[in-house]
Amino acid sequence: MVLDALKSAVDNDRLPFRELLVAAFLSGSIFLFHFRVMAFYGVLVIVGILHLGLQAWRCRRIKSWGMALGVLGILTVLTVLPAFWRAFMWYVTRASTTPVVRAQQQVMQEVYFALSWSAIPYLLAPRWLIGVGVACAIVVIARRSRVLDQIFWVVFLSLLGLTYHLGIPWLNISNLSGILIMFYLPLAVVIGDTLGWLLGHPRLPRVLRSSGMAVIAFFVCLNGAYARATGVESSRYFLANEDLEAMLWIKENVPTDAVFAVNTYFWMPSAPHGADGGYWIPYFAERQTTAGVMINHLGPSEYLEMVIQRSQQVKRLESGDATALHELRATGVTHIYVGALHPFCGGWTLAGSVASNGCTGFSVRPGRRGDFCHRPSFPIS
């Protein structure tokens, strides 16, 4: 829509205010959806805008292009200004003051930003499909197809994912893993464009030209639908019915200011993640946990520091460090919760620590009776 509005301004040598207004609202809605997605979208739009600017220069209508671009930019900023200012200030604050200590920054780069080649098929597409996409991209470049901007988009996004090498926090918008997930879009576009060009070739029989694309689309969609329907990652499902029953008991019997220590997994130094059903306590039992919630990073830096500190103490307790139990008490943790299922990161972590520290009357599954004589949670004070 943005490029159509700018193209209309260049072709007709006038400002299409209605189209520019709609394009600004749609662009602003992407920012309101997720500012990081807006960064990805912005790279694509900039590529198209520069291409249109080159065309406008050649036909001597650069003034119309510039005025339309200015109006579009102003309308977009006005659309998102309140949310944009708050998001920008949050981003600046997080870029300048991070709870991750300097000694952990190298670990963070290795865990969050670094990417192994073996992870690319998992994040993007099967190897054979990546090969087809590369071949089609070569054809698109050779033909100078109208979807050539998709190739530039891939290049610029890849560079964006590598900016962490510069050591400038402001440029660390996303890691390469998050960007690779987006590449299914240009991959589909370049493959579709190349197939359309091949099936439209005049040397092909008319039957293939008329029905070939439909047949290919059917089998491609069938393969994708099967992969989506059967591609279940069992590690994502770590909440059991027994956990739901236990959380109902917690909600009705445990004080509202209780804080639960839960099995924890650090997927990066500043991002603890619950490893069993206890991670869902804030949502089903309305009580706090040491791992926090799924949007920890949106909270104040002091809160995130507290979550990281408590989660680190939990990891020490899991490894058998008895002093961590006293430190957890000191930070306000009142209970320990062990889920009904094995933590996806492996082992009965907190369960072993509970037994070794003399806590009794405990089971990982709640009792069948309503009084929950064998509780999956118990006080540590």
Image (cartoon, rainbow, N blue to C red):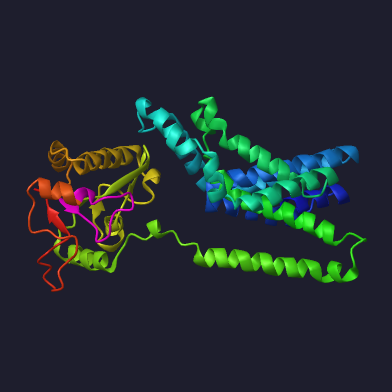
Which residue in the rendered view is the most extreme toward the front? 128
Q: Quick one: 284 or 132, which is closer to the camera?
A: 132
Q: Residue at x 64, y 44 (%)?
A: 42
Q: Position of residue 87 (x, y in %)?
A: 49, 43
Q: Quadrant location of residue 158?
A: top right
Residue 292 screen position, x and y as percent:
30, 48
The answer to whether 250 is drawn above or below residue 184 in the figure is below
Considering only vertical position in the picture, is 236 above or below 119? below
Task: Return the x and y of residue 296 as percentages of the image width and height.
Answer: 36, 46
The reply, left or right, for residue 112 in relation to residue 56 is: left
Q: Tell which residue pokes out farthest to the right in this image.
A: 203
Q: For this view, does 200 lie left or right of residue 296?
A: right
The magenta stretch spans residue 62: no
Which stretch appears magenta?
Answer: 335-350
In the rendered image, the vertical position of residue 378 relative to residue 369, given as above or below: above
Q: Is residue 1 visible?
A: no
The answer to whether 25 is drawn above or below residue 120 in the figure is below
Residue found at the far bottom of this picture: 369
